[in-house]
Amino acid sequence: GENVEQHPSTLSVQEGDSAVIKCTYSDSASNYFPWYKQELGKRPQLIIDIRSNVGEKKDQRIAVTLNKTAKHFSLHITETQPEDSAVYFCAAPNSGSARQLTFGSGTQLTVLP
Amino acid sequence: DVKVTQSSRYLVKRTGEKVFLECVQDMDHENMFWYRQDPGLGLRLIYFSYDVKMKEKGDIPEGYSVSREKKERFSLILESASTNQTSMYLCASSFSRGLEQYFGPGTRLTVT
């Protein structure tokens, strides 16, 4: 199956700075890479995703980049705000079953005021 | 708006008890999933189901079983709860060929 590694496990930034979270995957056939955000005490929710036919996707202050050759993808948050504080999970399709996702171990992002 | 609900937010059980966690979705999704969330380990798949009465093992199925008698409902069963099953349990659902998963609010299970 797919193996997804996520770094760093914790990240603290000053409000207004940028934050970058990186993930690597093992299956070169993977073609869909979502990012989920889980605020404290709440359920994970999809915030952005990218398919393997594009290298970058943006949605306001968040963007995801994909390097298929190196098999890694990253989440970029610019002009961070306190409400960006949360746990972020990356994921990739399980090579054994396209219906499944394999999740990274999560990154706790703290935005300091 | 997709809604995935779980039967309990918090549950405390004793070692050896049989535990049922229930999940219901109202979007006619074919796929349903049970995950376990532990700090530093992310979301680990226990079981998933892609149709009524169908189930497949995930990465950590030992000590768990599942039941899907109706399309909208997916139950996770701990036959004999143990302290190492203390965790947050998250249910999710998705369309048959869709990859976006919609999560429930989670059940915090404590086994004493």
Image (cartoon, coloured by chain):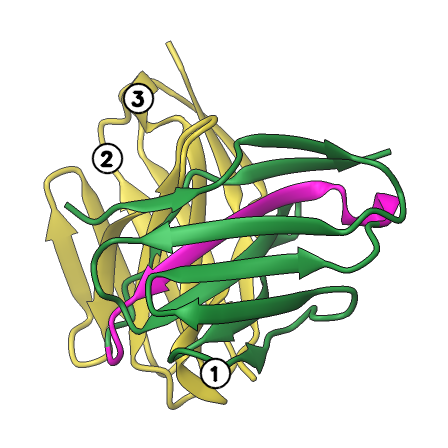
Chain colours: A yellow, B green
Amino acid on which the number 2 mark rests in the picture: Thr
Q: Position of residue B71 (x, y in %)?
A: 34, 69
| SS category of the residue bearing label 1 | loop
User: What residue is shown with label 1?
Assistant: B54
Range drawn in magenta: B82-97
User: What residue is shown with label 2?
Assistant: A78
Residue A43 magenta-drawn?
A: no
Label 3 vs 2, first from the N-terminus? 2
User: What residue is shown with label 3?
Assistant: A83
Residue lying at 82% horizontally and 50% vertically, measured from the top left? B81
Residue lying at 76% horizontally and 42% vertically, measured from the top left? B86
Q: Position of residue B19 (x, y in %)?
A: 71, 49
Residue lying at 77% horizontally and 70% vertically, measured from the top left? B62
Which of the pair A84/A80 is nearer the observer? A84
Label 1 vs label 2: CA separation? 43 Å
Label 3 vs label 2: CA separation? 13 Å
